[in-house]
Each structure stands twice: as structure tokens, then as C-alpha cells.
Image (tube, rainbow, N blue to C red):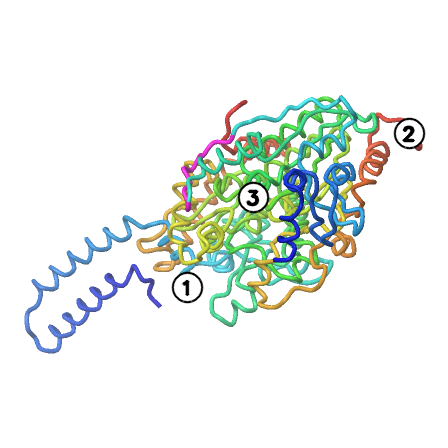
């Protein structure tokens, strides 16, 4: 399932492969033609990947094969021990978390979890948590505080689940509580937006001392489709909404909503997940180093100042 | 309908002109209501008890002790993203400002409520659906900080469709900002009471509105995270009767009390007096 805007690249790659195959099987020298096409391919990639629109990045943020929270936990961390359940109602598979080591440092981790195939996606509710998921996250925040280990959160959700069951169990209440609980952490907290940062369901685990974002991830108050459905009265205007919402990593850095951008391999993290995960690991280690030495009170005040300063208004 | 029109046309023209100004209809039961009495009854239908939406300024009048309210709000919104949908955000803001006479979707200040010193903040649904952008977030944070600094209780009347789309991620960040500002009250042991009115949804419910010491809701008010339309699209079936109404929230344990607007001030005063450490024991004051 190639993304629409990648098709010219894939077609060219296919032609080059065909030519190479012809050259090999017939013995005809096609070296010059192949080199020409390869140069053209490099230019085309530069042109497309170097000028991605907001909507194209949204598609990359959702691309199959993009690293999920569990991929990162398995490959960048050591001995991830998953912990389950909210101790009140259920275990929510849309949020995972537990204990891990990052280069030997003890940490507590939590993150939204999307499925890596259709079956898992149904099980994970497409990464849309119920209240239980946020209660599990809060329980893990308690654990981080109790032992003084840094708290790391991976954000990748289209949004908290908008359904009857979630409303009955107080979706709004647990999101508010999770925001509050996370803001009060006594340990260093880092949030990292892996793919989709959909509204309050993302922010609930995003109140960190530093917020990092992958190059092609997005973060906003609403998804482009829902925004288009409301403001343009047509979900098909999502590309326009994506542009207007200024939801790309670079836009968010300018708004100070995020503190740093983590580079992705050419064409998106799904083209080379291991490379992307290596970049994530390096960024986390660097950020943990920055927060080292801050006292619990300083960490709290740092978070307060960070979020207190966000917004744009004029004095009366 | 046609017959009604015919009938109306035969009335003396002077009376006819007065009709739209003097009378209105209950949105729920349709009964004709004399506007002056309707207003005096706090926009509650005397026949069926339906609670209609209420202008922010009258809400202040209803809750603040007479003559004590001093407005502190008035920050002006900007258009930080240069947002344009079918109309530029800057134009929408201007239209709302002209329509409501307010800079943004909140009216607030200092006052006493039943003698208890308070900061009272009222969201204005008439301004962009009461949506929370940078101004609303900042006014709430300043309100909480002022209450903490001056030893006042904080009372917020919520009425909002949620976070304001046209300020995108900055609106989202107001959820964190407002929630964190409440810590200043916690540190000083000052009470925070939230009043949820019709409607309170999205990022407003999911931030400061849900975190009060005591939460009141008005009868029949729509309160929730996702709006009913979004939920209907998600589950593709009709929603149960009374879903997301104040009474549903009470049953599911999310609010403390569902209180008739005509008794709201009395109950609010009792809650504030119970909670505020600076107010001595007094019953029935």
C-alpha cells in the first residue's frame, strides 16, 4: 500500500530494477541509461521528500511499519517488563507501560499502542484509549515517583476513544486527572510524539519537562479530518485543515509546543525503523542528561513554567 | 401554521410589533413565556423546568453578591497561526466581539459570594461556542493565581464546546496550563468549585472543569468528552436516552450535585462556606 505521493518514486525504482534485470539476462550494456534514471530518482526523492506538505506528513505519521511504542521499547531499551491493568476496572491494550532500562538507567515507560496489523489494531482499539488506559498511566506515574526513576511517555494516538463506554467511565475526568498527575511528577519526565498526537488523549501523557517529536509526526487539538468536517463541513478537505492547523514538527517547534525534532530516515521512519529508533534513543539519552541534577521541586517548577508560558494574546 | 399567521395579521399592528420583544417560547415544552418573568426566573421554564442557556453577564449577577463584582478579564485574542478555513479566524473574532461586546469567551473578576471572597469566572457560550483558546486559558490561569494570592475561593461556570480549533496546538496547551494553575490554590488550601452548564464538552471538561473540589451541574446540561455527533459517527447507532446529561453524570459518579439554577447560589454559598478555611461556622447565613 504505497502512499499516493510516493508513487512516482516507486514507479521509477521499478523501471530501474527492470532495466537492471534486462541488462543481466541479455548481457546488453544499459549502464548509461540506468545511471541516468538513478540520478533522476535521486532528484525526484529530493523534490518529494524535501517538500512534504502537512497532509503528506500526516500520512507518513500513520504509515504501516512506522515504529510503535512496543517497537521502541523492544529495540532501544533493555529488559522491558510490561505491567498491566488499572487496578480498578480493566487492562487497556491501547496504552502499554512498565519498567525498563535505557543504557543501564532505570526508567518507567508508558505509551499509546497501535496495532501492527489489522487484527492487532482491533485489539488495540487503533491506539484510542479508554479511561482504564489513563488510569494505568497514572499508576505508572506513581511508581516512577515512588522510586525516583525518570518517566518516559510515547505518544501515538488519533485521540482518546469517543464512545459510550468511555463516556460512562469518565473519559474527560481521567484525562484531566492524568494531566494533573503528570504535571506533579517529582522525577524527570520526557514525552515523545512518535506518530499521531491527537488532542487531549495525547496531552494526557504529554505534560513533560521536555516534549520531543519525530520529524513527520503531528500534534494538535483535533485531527485534520475532524477539523475539516466541522469547519469546512467536509472531511475530504483534510489536506487544507492539516495545513491550517500548523501541526507539523517544524510548526510546533516555532510555537514552542515541542522542544526538539528527532530526524527520520529519508521517506519516513517506516522506511528504516531501526535507524529511526536509534535516533530516538540518542535523543532520549541526551534529554535525560539535560534534566539530570534538577531537584524534584525544580523539575515541577520547570514543567509549570514551560506550560504556563504557552499561548498568544494581547494585554487589554 | 398558516392559520396562525392569518390570525396574527389581524391583530392591531401596535401589539404585533411588541410580541417579539415581550414574549418568548420555552425551547423544551413550547409554552409562551413573558420575557421579563422568564429572565427573573433565571431562564428556567416555570412550567417544565427546562434550563435555557443564560448570558454570561446575568450569570455573574446571579452568583456575585450585589455590587461586589469587579471585572478583571479583558485580554485580547490574537491569530497566532493565521488560521483560515471558509473564513479567516481574525474576521470571525471580530464578528464575535461585535456580537457579544466581549474580547473573548470569558467574563470574570473578583467579588464576594455569600460573603466569601472569590474569583468568579464565567465562560460565554455566545462567543465562539465558549471555546478555549489562549485568552480563555490565560484568564483562567490568572484567575486561579489571583485567588491564591488574595485568599479567595475560585468559582468557574463552564459553558463550552471545547478547545478552540483555530489556535490548534496552542489551544490544546491551555488544558495543561489551566490544570497546573489550580495547584496554586491547592497549596493555599483554597476552595475551587466548578459549575457545569449546557453544554460543557471536549478540552474544557477534560481539564480544569473536571478537577474542582466540588462539582455542580445544571439539570439537563450536556456534559462529556466527545460530542454526541462524534460518538454517533463512531459507534454508528443511536445513543441511549439521557446519555451525557447532568443526571447521567451524577449516576455515573462524575459530579457531586445536580442543582436547579434557582437554588444554585444557595448551594454554592454553602459549599464555599464549608470549604473556605477563613470562614467560621455559620448555618443559614
Judge from the rendering whether residue A76 lies leftward or rightward of residue A7; answer left or right.
right
Q: Position of residue B44 (x, y in %)?
A: 76, 44
Q: Position of residue B70 (x, y in %)?
A: 69, 22
Q: Is mark 1 on a helix, strand or loop?
A: loop
Q: Is mark 3 on a helix, strand or loop?
A: loop
- Which label was assigned to residue A158? none
Which residue, given by chain and number where applicable, does mark 1 sit on? A64
Q: Is any part of residue B190 visible from this angle?
A: yes
A159 within the magenta span: no
Q: Residues within 10 Å of mark 2 (few under 14, many from 20)?
A: few
Highlighted range, magenta: B77-86
Name the residue located 62 percent from the left edge and 48 percent from the top edge: B9
Q: In which quarter of the view is residue A171 placed? A: bottom right
Q: In which quarter of the view is residue B192 placed? A: top right
Q: Is residue B11 above or below residue B236?
A: above
Q: Where is residue B1 in the image (x, y as percent from the top left)?
A: 63, 58
Q: Subunit of mark 2? A: B
Which residue, given by chain and number where applicable, does mark 3 sit on? B163
Q: Is any part of residue A294 visible from this angle?
A: no
- Measure the C-alpha gap from mark 1 to mark 2: 65 Å
Judge from the rendering whether residue A158 lies leftward or rightward of residue B56; answer left or right.
left
Amino acid at each position: 500500500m504505497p502512499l499516493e505521493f510516493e508513487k512516482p518514486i516507486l514507479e521509477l525504482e521499478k523501471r530501474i530494477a527492470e532495466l537492471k534485470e534486462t541488462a543481466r539476462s541479455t548481457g546488453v550494456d544499459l549502464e548509461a541509461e540506468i545511471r541516468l534514471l538513478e540520478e533522476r530518482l535521486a532528484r525526484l526523492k529530493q523534490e518529494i521528500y524535501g517538500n512534504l506538505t502537512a497532509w503528506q506528513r500526516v500520512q507518513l505519521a500513520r504509515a504501516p511499519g512506522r515504529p510503535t511504542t512496543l517497537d521502541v521499547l523492544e529495540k532501544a531499551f533493555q529488559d522491558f517488563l510490561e505491567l498491566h491493568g488499572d487496578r480498578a476496572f480493566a487492562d487497556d491494550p491501547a496504552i502499554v507501560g512498565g519498567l525498563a532500562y535505557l543504557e543501564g538507567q532505570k526508567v518507567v515507560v508508558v505509551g499509546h499502542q497501535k496495532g501492527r496489523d489489522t487484527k492487532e489494531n482491533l485489539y488495540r482499539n487503533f491506539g484510542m484509549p479508554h479511561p482504564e488506559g489513563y488510569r494505568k498511566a497514572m499508576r505508572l506515574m506513581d511508581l516512577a515517583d515512588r522510586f525516583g526513576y525518570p518517566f518516559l511517555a510515547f505518544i501515538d494516538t488519533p485521540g482518546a476513544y469517543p464512545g459510550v463506554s468511555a463516556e460512562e467511565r469518565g473519559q474527560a475526568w481521567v484525562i484531566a486527572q492524568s494531566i494533573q498527575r503528570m504535571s506533579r511528577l517529582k522525577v524527570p519526565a520526557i514525552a515523545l510524539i512518535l506518530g499521531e498526537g491527537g488532542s487531549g488523549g495525547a496531552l494526557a501523557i504529554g505534560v513533560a519537562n521536555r516534549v520531543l517529536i519525530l520529524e513527520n509526526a503531528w500534534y494538535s487539538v483535533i485531527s485534520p479530518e475532524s477539523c475539516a468536517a466541522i469547519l469546512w463541513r467536509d472531511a475530504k478537505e483534510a489536506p487544507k485543515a492539516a495545513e491550517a492547523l500548523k501541526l507539523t514538527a517544524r510548526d510546533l517547534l516555532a510555537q514552542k509546543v515541542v522542544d526538539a525534532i528527532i530526524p527520520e530516515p529519508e521517506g519516513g521512519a517506516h522506511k528504516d525503523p531501526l535507524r529511526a529508533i536509534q535516533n530516538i534513543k540518542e535523543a532520549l539519552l541526551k534529554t535525560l542528561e539535560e534534566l539530570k541534577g534538577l531537584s524534584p521541586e525544580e523539575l515541577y517548577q520547570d514543567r509549570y513554567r514551560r506550560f504556563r508560558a504557552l499561548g498568544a494574546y494581547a494585554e487589554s | 401554521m398558516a392559520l396562525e399567521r392569518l390570525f396574527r395579521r389581524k391583530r392591531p399592528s401596535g401589539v404585533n410589533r411588541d410580541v417579539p420583544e415581550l414574549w418568548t417560547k420555552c425551547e423544551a415544552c413550547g409554552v409562551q413565556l413573558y420575557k421579563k418573568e422568564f429572565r427573573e426566573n433565571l431562564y428556567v421554564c416555570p412550567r417544565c423546568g427546562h434550563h435555557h442557556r443564560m448570558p454570561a453577564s446575568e450569570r455573574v449577577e446571579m452568583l456575585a453578591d450585589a455590587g461586589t463584582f469587579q471585572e478583571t478579564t479583558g485580554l485580547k485574542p490574537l491569530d497566532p497561526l493565521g488560521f483560515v478555513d471558509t473564513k479567516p479566524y481574525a474576521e470571525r473574532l471580530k464578528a464575535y466581539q461585535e456580537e457579544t461586546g466581549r474580547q473573548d469567551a470569558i467574563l470574570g473578576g473578583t467579588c464576594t459570594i455569600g460573603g466569601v471572597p472569590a474569583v468568579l469566572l464565567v465562560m460565554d457560550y455566545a462567543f465562539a461556542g465558549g471555546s478555549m483558546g489562549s485568552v480563555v486559558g490565560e484568564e483562567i490561569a490568572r484567575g486561579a493565581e489571583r485567588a491564591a494570592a488574595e485568599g479567595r475561593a475560585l468559582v468557574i461556570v463552564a459553558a463550552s464546546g471545547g478547545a478552540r480549533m483555530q489556535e490548534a496546538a496552542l489551544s490544546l496547551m491551555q488544558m495543561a496550563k489551566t490544570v497546573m494553575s489550580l495547584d496554586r490554590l491547592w497549596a493555599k488550601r483554597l476552595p475551587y468549585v466548578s459549575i457545569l452548564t449546557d453544554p460543557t464538552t471536549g478540552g474544557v471538561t477534560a481539564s480544569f472543569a473536571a478537577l474542582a473540589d466540588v462539582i455542580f451541574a445544571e439539570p439537563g446540561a450536556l456534559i462529556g468528552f466527545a460530542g454526541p455527533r462524534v460518538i454517533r459517527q463512531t459507534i454508528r447507532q443511536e445513543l441511549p436516552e439521557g446519555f451525557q446529561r447532568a443526571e447521567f453524570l451524577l449516576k455515573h459518579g462524575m459530579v457531586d450535585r445536580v442543582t436547579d439554577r434557582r437554588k444554585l447560589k444557595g448551594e454554592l454559598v454553602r459549599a464555599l462556606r464549608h470549604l473556605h478555611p477563613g470562614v467560621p461556622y455559620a448555618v443559614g447565613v
